Amino acid sequence: MYRTLFRLVFRRMDPEQAHHLAFRWIRLAARVPVLRTFAAAALAPRFEELRTEAFGLRMHGPFGLAAGFDKNAVGIDGLAMAGFDHVEIGTVTGEPQSGNPKRRLFRLVPDRALINRMGFNNEGSAAVAERLAARTARGPVFRTTVGVNIGKTKVVPESEAVADYVLSTERLARHADYLVVNVSSPNTPGLRSLQAVDQLRPLLTAVREAADRTVTRRRVPLLVKIAPDLADEDVDAVADLAVELGLDGIIATNTTIARESLGLASDPDLTAETGGLSGAPLKERSLEVLSRLYARVGDRITLVGVGGVEDAEDAWQRILAGATLVQGYSAFIYRGPFWSREIHQGLAARLARSPYATLAEAVGAATRSTGGPENRKKADA
């Protein structure tokens, strides 16, 4: 049914307009008590065996929605109703910004992919903090883990980037179940240069200190999100830095600026659009980065696998490669509202067929037992 709706309605619309329309429907459904009860029952079945703990937080399962869908924290309850075990909002910047000029979001339907150059369009950290505080005050309709993804304001020069991230941290850390430093979007000039260890170290140190200074009653977990386009030695350097600084997690990966090596089938004029590409073509490289990170950090750092996750098998391979949590986004556009349910059902079925009693046992177990990520599928079989 959704695929018919997508083909007849959404596919004919501008992708950004279609996103706003679909998201509005999700938010409206979450405001109607009877409707949201039935929707949650249909979309968000719970499987006890999938319960997950990551950086001290307990979740119904490992599967969450990546940053970018809900930039301003306007629909957390609706997304929890749709079955996501955690919702990462943002990217939020220190100051409000409109983002890049439209048109800035493109569907690559034959490739089940998206290209975006949104440019961190959001209402700014002050407005988002106020909205998160109001949600807490009135009581969440659905309890879910909320991650807050922060980035650099476009007009802020690189020399002042640390202060910009600290400003957002001071405003948002108290409202975040976990905090993510995004240094990997290709759509803010100069942002990816912050992934270099000599720049990343003082940035993460300052954000950690700001979070601890702002929130004294608990330790807010801190993660960093990296690009799939990093060279392998740079992936290793970020992994070593994360261990050195006592970081809580690494999210692998953001969108890619690569095109030629991905075997894209869409119109060349469309694939040539600038911006970050997400979806199915990112699957292989994202999994490679995740596996490399796990080989480097083992169980010392929580890993979050994202990039090209379309179905339960993709999510399961991320778990076998060492990811405690898995995120998706682009496939939500193509698969529709039952996508999360399908992921959970598939993961429960795979866990039942595996030698592991829980997902926690599965995380990295195949890698450790077989001596390398290349043998994940053999272990799964």
Image (cartoon, grey):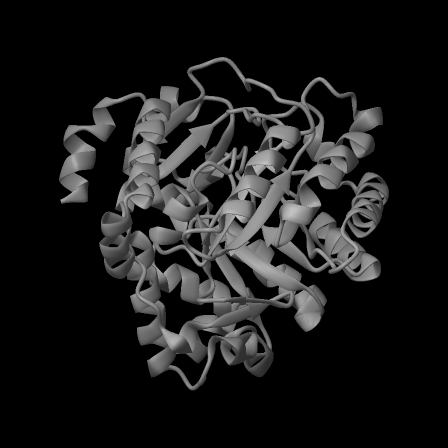
Name the one closer to the observer, 258 or 18. 18
The residue at the point 51 percent across, 26 percent down is 275
Tell how many labels: 0
**Where is residue 215 shown, x and y percent of the image?**
76, 51
The residue at the point 56 percent across, 57 percent down is 304
The image quarter in which residue 84 lies: bottom left
The image quarter in which residue 245 lies: bottom right
Drawn side of residue 157 relative to residue 78, left or right: right
- As drawn, the residue found furthest toward the top would be 101
Drawn side of residue 109 relative to residue 89, left or right: left
Quadrant location, the C terminus: bottom left
Q: Mark yes or no: residue 220 visible.
A: yes
Name the one closer to the observer, 5 or 83. 83
The residue at the point 58 percent across, 26 percent down is 187
Q: Mark yes or no: residue 381 visible.
A: no
Drawn side of residue 342 relative to residue 145, left or right: left
**Where is residue 150 shown, x and y percent of the image?**
65, 38
**Where is residue 108 shown, x and y percent of the image?**
34, 32
Quadrant location, the N terminus: top left
**Where is residue 301 shown, x and y percent of the image?**
69, 64
Q: Image height check: is 146 above or below 71? A: below
Drawn side of residue 81 relative to residue 321, left or right: left
- As drawn, the residue found furthest toward the front would be 138
